[in-house]
């Protein structure tokens, strides 16, 4: 979602529909949720979350049989309730494994009862203590991104009598045709190991390292198949290299990266992605696990951020609507120029005109930064102070990037789940995380300040 904002597209994002002019998410009235939990509020739909994960799983199984796997990228949304839901999906026997990039994410995945053997430790800066703790927790798969990291992992594993299964994350030097700040597979990016170094390392023997695969990740919010095809071609060459050099290839990690459109639909579909992976990797009858690590395409459309208009004023040729979420609640627009539709919770059926703004509506946050803005929003023409609004497709890279900047409390987070009863279904709402409390932060800081450390 890094295209210019935003066609007043008539189709609503997945899961949203007006009933009696009131916007509902997964059948649940958003106005009622605002009344109970207040705003700003992250709201997730377990139903959409699991369906998105299932689409990936189905695509990988269709094309790679039992060797096709989905390792959810925990960074997209690491809330325990989200991870638990993915690990124990209603679709039954298809729990996701997990891709983590820090010890904190690992702890969260373990807390959601994802078994350590199903967790892959990725990330371009693993500290010694993170690697040691991961090995001690039973994590066996590492995607390594530097020669020095490999040496450190080898000595740590040796010192505790463990063996680390390693895929080197290679640099494919592919332009993913996405926003510069989420491109990760070019020579100039900070990620991965350059091919010459990776080839040298794969030919070496290490006491506590077992090379068993190859990994790659070219970026996020990729909406065309071509960069993936280029990447699969490069990986196919690596598979050939590893085979010819005696490395027993057991897994190929293709990284994450399918993008979504303004409705939250993946473009292309997971099925097209997996078909292409199959076509280019040419793995028929080889017993090699093929993993994809989607984050955004599983979590984004499963979440929205409910907010309220606080103030409206004219600025230049625009009407500026200040809403009660800022870059501390949702950083993606300020950080990546990401476009997210903001839509009204109550549909106004008045005839054309009366209260409608005719100028562009510019949604902005209350944080004291010029970058704290959410773009021109064509669907907010009738907004008044106090109106409830929904920022859509906010489930990925939203809540995980919140902060208390400007001493603003982080939003509360809830999840809607379906409960089946006799012949009907109802919703249950679970609080995933309380709203942050600045009063509690002040207490904690005052307490910390009572301890003086002398050096
Ligand atoms: N895997 C790795 C190594 C990543 O860095 C990322 C995100 O950038 C992902 C998976 C998830 O990507 P996405 O959310 O685009 O699917």
Image (spheres, rainbow, N blue to C red):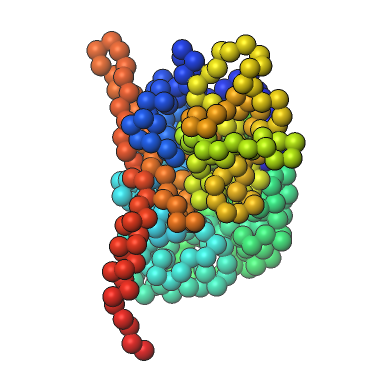
**x, y (%) of residue 433?**
34, 44
Q: Residue at x 33, y 31 (%)?
A: 36
Pick the residue in front: 146 or 399. 399
Question: What is the tally of numbered marks visible in this picture?
Answer: 0
**x, y (%) of residue 173?**
72, 55
**x, y (%) of residue 404?**
45, 55
| Vertical order, 112 against 43 (above or below) | below
Q: State whether residue 168 appears in this view.
A: yes
**Residue found at the very far right of the displayed protein:** 317
| Vertical order, 275 against 176 (above or below) | above
**Residue found at the very far left of the displayed protein:** 422
Pick the residue in front: 227 or 361. 361
| Vertical order, 368 against 148 (above or below) | above
Specify whether 59 is left or right of 132: right
Quadrant location, the N terminus = top right
Specify whether 376 is left or right of 383: right
**x, y (%) of residue 138?**
33, 58
Q: Residue at x 42, y 44 (%)?
A: 411
Quadrant for residue 135, please give it: bottom left
Q: State whether residue 244 appears in this view.
A: no
Pick the residue in front: 358 or 276. 358
**Residue found at the very far bottom of the displayed protein:** 455
Q: Residue at x 28, y 10 (%)?
A: 423
Quadrant location, the C terminus = bottom left
Q: Residue at x 39, y 58 (%)?
A: 104
């Amino acid at each position: 979602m890094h295209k210019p904002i935003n066609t007043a597209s008539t189709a609503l994002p997945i899961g949203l529909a007006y009933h009696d002019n009131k916007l509902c998410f997964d059948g649940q009235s958003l106005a009622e949720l605002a009344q109970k939990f207040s705003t700003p509020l992250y709201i997730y739909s377990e139903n959409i979350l699991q369906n998105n994960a299932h689409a990936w799983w189905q695509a990988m199984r269709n094309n790679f049989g039992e060797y096709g796997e989905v390792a959810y990228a925990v960074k997209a949304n690491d809330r325990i309730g989200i991870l638990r839901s993915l690990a124990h999906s209603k679709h039954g026997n298809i729990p996701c494994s997990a891709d983590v990039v820090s010890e904190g994410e690992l702890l969260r995945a373990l807390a959601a009862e994802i078994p350590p053997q199903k967790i892959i430790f990725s990330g371009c800066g693993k500290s010694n203590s993170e690697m040691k703790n991961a090995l001690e927790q039973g994590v066996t798969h590492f995607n390594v991104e530097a020669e020095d990291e490999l040496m450190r992992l080898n000595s740590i594993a040796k010192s505790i009598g463990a063996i680390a299964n390693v895929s080197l994350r290679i640099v494919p030097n592919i332009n993913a045709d996405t926003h510069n700040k989420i491109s990760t597979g070019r020579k100039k990016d900070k990620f991965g190991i350059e091919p010459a170094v990776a080839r040298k390392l794969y030919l070496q023997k290490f006491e506590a390292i077992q090379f068993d695969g190859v990994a790659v990740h070219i970026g996020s919010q990729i909406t065309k198949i071509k960069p993936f095809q280029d990447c699969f071609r490069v990986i196919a060459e690596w598979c050939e290299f590893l085979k010819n050099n005696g490395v027993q290839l057991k897994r190929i990690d293709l990284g994450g990266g399918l993008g979504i459109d303004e409705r939250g639909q993946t473009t292309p579909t997971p099925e097209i992605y997996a078909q292409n992976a199959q076509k280019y990797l040419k793995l028929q009858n080889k017993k090699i696990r093929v993993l994809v690590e989607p984050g955004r395409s599983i979590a984004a459309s499963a979440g929205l951020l409910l907010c309220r208009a606080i103030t409206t004023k004219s600025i230049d040729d625009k009407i500026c609507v200040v809403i009660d979420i800022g870059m501390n609640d949702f950083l993606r627009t300020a950080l990546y120029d990401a476009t997210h539709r903001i839509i009204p919770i109550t549909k106004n059926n008045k005839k054309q005109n009366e209260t409608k703004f005719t100028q562009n509506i510019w949604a902005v946050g209350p944080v004291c930064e010029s970058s704290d803005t959410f773009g021109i929003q064509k669907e907010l023409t009738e907004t008044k102070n106090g109106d409830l609004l929904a920022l859509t497709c906010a489930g990925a890279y939203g809540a995980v990037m919140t902060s208390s900047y400007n001493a603003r409390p982080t939003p509360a987070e809830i999840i809607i789940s379906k409960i089946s009863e006799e012949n009907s279904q109802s919703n249950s709402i679970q609080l995933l995380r309380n709203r942050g409390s600045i009063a509690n932060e002040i207490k904690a800081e005052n307490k910390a300040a009572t301890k003086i450390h002398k050096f």
